[in-house]
Structures are given as C-alpha cells and as structure tokens.
Amino acid sequence: MSFEAIRGQEKAVRLIRAGLKRGRVAHAYLFSGPRGVGKRAAALALAKALNCPSAPPDACCDRCHTCRRIENGNHPDVVRIAPDGASIKIDQVRRLQREFAYAAAEADYRVVLIEQVEAMTVEAANSMLKFLEEPVTPMVAVLIAEQEDAVLPTIRSRCQRIRFAPLLPEHLEASLTREGVDPAMARIAAHVAGGLDEARRLVERDEFARLCEQVIKWSGEVLAGRGNALVSLQTEWMKGNPDRNALETVLELMLLWLRDLLNRRLGRTDQEIFTPWANELSRQSAGWTPSRLVQVMDCVIQARRQLNGPMQPQSVLEQMVLAIQEGSLHARSDRSPLSTSG
Ligand SMILES: [Zn+2]
C-alpha cells in the first residue's frame, strides 16, 4: 500500500511525507492511534519510500521488487518486532542489535517496525534506547502503539510523534463495501467498530446479522414492557460466556438502534443505519417518546462504562435492563399520552 492508498489519515501522512521530501527523516517515529486505522500500512509505506529506486523521495512505486518484498515481509533490511507472548523482551532487542551490527544487505535505509511498544519490558526498552541512539547503519525505527501515553516517557521523548486519527464511519463503510461486504452490514459494522480490522472481524462472522436481529427483538420486548427482556439477556447474550469486547459490541448495537429510533421519531431519516429494518423502525419508534428513548440510551451508555469496571458483565447488563424497566414504570405512571402500554 502506498501513502495515497491510506484513507482518512491525511494529516499523519502529510507529516511523514514532508520529512521525506526535505530529506529530514527522524531516527525514530512513534505512530499512535486506534487499531486498524493504517499505522502499519504507513510504516511500510515509509520503509518503501526510503528504499524504492523508482519514485520521488516522498513516495513509492508499490510495484518494484523492493516495494513488493517490503509489503510481503521478505525484505532483509526491513524487520518487524512484535510481542513474544505478553511482552517485547530484551532478547528480541538483542537479536535485532546483533543483526544490525553488520552493514545493510542492500537497503539505503534499514527500517525496524516495533509493534505494540506499550508491551515492552523496561529492560527491553532501555536496550532499545541505546540502540536508537547509536545506530550502526542509517536506520529508521517506527514504534507503533495504540496509546501514546502508555509508552515509556524515555522512549516517547526520543521519537517524532505522529498521531493517527480514528477512522470516520464513512471511511470504514467505503472500505468494507469496496472489499465486497454487503452494504447494509458494512454500514452497521462501520458505525460499531473503532477501526477497519475490528469492522472486518465483525462482518466476517455469520452471527453479526443475527446479533442485529436479537438487539432489535430485544428493543421490541423492552418497548412492550415485558419481562422477556431480562430472560433474553440471560438466554441469548450471556450464552457461551461472551467476553467484554463481545458485550461492548452488543451495547454499541443497542445504542445505534436506539439512535435510529430517536431519529425516526423526530422525522430525521437521512442518516439511518439499520436501513434493512425500515418497517421495524417505523413500528417501534411509534411506541416511544423522544425523552424516553434518551433515557434508555443513558442506561445503555452507563452500562457500557461499567463494563470496563470491576462489576461482573452479567450484573452490568441485568442492572441496565432493570433500570430501563424502572424508567418504563415511571413513564407510565406519569401518564404520558405517548408512553407505551405494557
Ligand atoms: Zn518501488
């Protein structure tokens, strides 16, 4: 992938290319940002631009022997390090130092990509620092992290920092559709996921469409004020002990659906996400007041927050359902003309 093919990261790419153009390449970069937004692709594009014989300094042809080997991980002077188990260990850094003690096999610039720098032991980090400061051959290190703050300050301060923005849902949706994903599912996944990798993982699984159905059905049960909402939570969502990430996806889907209901209720239909369920949107939205929808969304947002805390996921969801149902009782006792009858 060339710089041009990296979507939604204009600012980051501009910064990297400006350095290349002026011949001012940093010894070490820290690329930070959410997963799946293009950090690794940008690091590879940088490695290619530094070594491609047939493109201007701030670009790569993406076709020559050099570019292709870098893309495929077969170039002897472009090395990737990722955590071995839970962390990047000092042995990995030492091995790298030994390899780089000799002249480059063929590259003008050697490039070392270090993934998940947050997971570097302090020992490995210290060893890495020494390595960054005393390079034997012209080399560039690209450190990749999700969160800049999680990287040791001593390392951070020696790098040129480049921040990668979360991708907008429109970018994700366009990428997924280009890859042949069903447009309706692409739209929903793009709004749930934080990056392309995550969005791809969602749509790859058959159960994603079923999960959408379940969320919609659940919303109907809550609307009807039946006790089923709590039962389906136990029988459907907690089945197979889902991890927190899976439950977060469920909550994100609920929020999206509720937002669609609210927009429908307010007559704003141009940005609807759940387009294949237009009839169900009409049916359900007629039974809610906007204020009640906002209240339910609040309960879901609070549950999403609690999911990252010490409480058991099952309890978080149960409390959420109870809080929503309690809200229904209040709404009904207020005798709001638009509230639902149970
Ligand atoms: Zn090339």
Image (cartoon, helix red, strand yellow):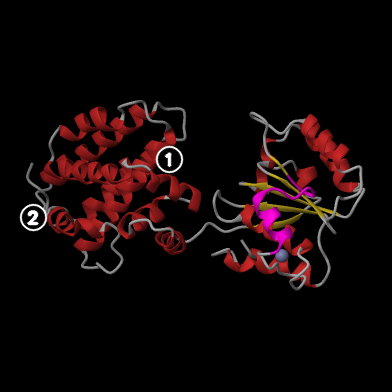
The answer to which quarter of the image holds residue 319 is top left
Q: Nearer the viewer, residue 197 or 143?
A: 197
Q: Do residues under tags 2 and 1 come within 8 Å of each other at their CB atoms?
A: no
Magenta part of the chain:
64-79
Q: Which mark is residue 305?
A: 1
- Quarter holding ligand 1: bottom right
The amino acid at mark 2 is: Pro
Which residue lies under the disc numbered 2? 337
Q: Secondary structure at mark 2?
A: loop
- Which residue is painted at 18% across and 59% down in the image? 278
User: Seen from this angle, which residue lies furthest front?
Assistant: 65
The number of discs equals 2
Q: Nearer the viewer, residue 102 or 164?
A: 102
Give the answer, above or below, for where 65 lies relative to 199: below
Q: Nearer the viewer, residue 84 or 243?
A: 84
The answer to which quarter of the image holds residue 128 is top right
Position of residue 160 measured from the top left corner of the image (x, y, whole percent)? 76, 57
Give the answer, above or below, for where 336 lies relative to 307: below
